[in-house]
Amino acid sequence: QVLLVESGGGSVQAGGSLRLSCAASGYINSVNFIGWFRQAPGKEREGVAAIYTGDSSTIYGDSVKGRFTISRDNAKNTVYLQMNSLKPEDTAMYYCAAKIPGSSGAWYNQYGYSYWGQGTQVTVSS
């Protein structure tokens, strides 16, 4: 079992920044990817970014490339999502999720992730 707890959401004006945190606990050695997803009202859940726990390589969705950065602090068992140049369309509930080896689907496919946090709200005003 892996427990994920997000924090750091809030309200910000367009152009501002936020840093989300995802603290992991439990059997975290079983995880090979940590991903950030977001879901706006009436929209499907969207993959934002992911980090591979083996070598910390990262991958991003097209809508956030160049603005968001995913990183990890192994000592704290925490994954971060630094969000800069925020836009109103970034408004959503943000979730972190953990993927285990052998699970199917690309990094942006929510159905391949086994563990999810409760989410943190990000609201960007124009």
Image (cartoon, rainbow, N blue to C red):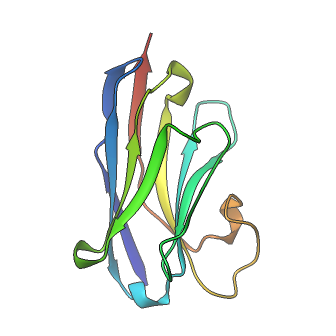
Q: Residue at x 42, y 17 (%)?
A: 14
Q: Measuring from the top left, give residue 1's x and y in whole percent.
A: 43, 84
Give the image location of residue 122, x and y in percent: 40, 33
Which residue corresponds to the image point at 38% horizontal and 67% vertical from the top-left? 4
- Looking at the rendered structure, the number of numbered marks drawn on it comes to 0
* Residue 18 placement, left or right of 104: left
Q: Residue furthest top?
A: 126
**From what the image shows, is residue 78 above or below residue 68?**
below
Determine whether 91 is above or below 34 in the image: above
Residue that protrudes farthest toward the right in the picture: 105
Q: Tell me where residue 70 sits by quadrant.
A: bottom left
Is 39 situated above or below 21? above
Which quadrant would residue 52 be assigned to in this image? bottom right
Q: Nearer the viewer, residue 105 or 116?
A: 105
- In the displayed orientation, state which residue is furthest to the left: 76
The image shows residue 29, relative to residue 32, as above or below, that is: below
Residue 38, percent across and down? 55, 44
- Dividing the image into 4 quarters, which one contains the C terminus? top left
Residue in the picture at 59% in, 30% down: 41
In the image, is 50 to the left or to the right of 102? left
Q: Position of residue 12 (x, y in %)?
A: 33, 23
| Residue located at (39% from left, 88% from top) | 27
Residue 51 is left or right of residue 84, and the answer is: right
